[in-house]
Image: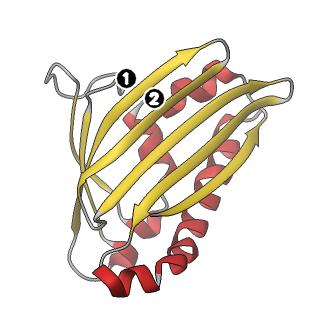
Amino acid sequence: MAVYERSVLVDAPFEEVWAFHSRVSGLEALTPDWMHLHIEGVRGPDGDPDPDILETGSTIESSVRLFDVGPRQRWISYIATRREGDGEAMFRDEMTRGPFPHWVHTHRFEATPDGTRVHDRVEYRLPGGPLGRLVGPLGVVGFEPMFRYRHRRTKELLEP
């Protein structure tokens, strides 16, 4: 299993950073334009549409079309875990349908004296079976611009 990790320190209070990332509007704001994200639907754990907070059990149905080339790819994410307490929080989303055979994204947040540390960890397997495993390290090439954008945008939107 390949793993990608990246962290950033955001000069903003933990509560604001956590609240921002706890809503589907945060996902929309942090997705680069070149991914052409469309949110098709969001359901809370009780089945209610468009929940305010993405709690454990929430599902996000979306589609992406990278660089506006080729067909749209459906992507369904399930919030498998969500915890908060004592200046730390995390949530984990798992792709249940989409372009990767395996995708688990853990988002961690930690209050620090200088703001909030945001840490992303993605465990993934590229499509293509054995060939995909051979080029697995190239996944970082695609992930780096996306997460660099997400972290830069988080700072732009939340820092004073």
- Residue at 38% across, 36% down: 24
Which residue reaches farthest top?
A: 86
Identify which amino acid the numbered label 1 is placed on. Answer: Ile
Tell me if residue 15 comes above or below residue 99 in the rendering. Answer: above
Which residue is denoted by mark 2 in the rendering?
A: 22
Q: Secondary structure at mark 1?
A: loop
Q: Which mark is residue 29?
A: none
Number of other residues with Cα within 10 Å of mark 1, as a class: few under 14, some 14 to 19, many 20 or more = some
Q: Nearer the viewer, residue 118 or 136?
A: 136
Specify whether 46 is left or right of 83: left
The C terminus - image quarter: top right
Which residue is denoted by mark 1 in the rendering?
A: 53
Identify which amino acid the numbered label 2 is placed on. Answer: Ser
Kindly indicate the quadrant of the structure image that contains residue 98.
bottom left
Q: Are marks 1 and 2 in contact (CB under 8 Å)?
A: yes
Upstream in sequence: badge 1 or badge 2: 2
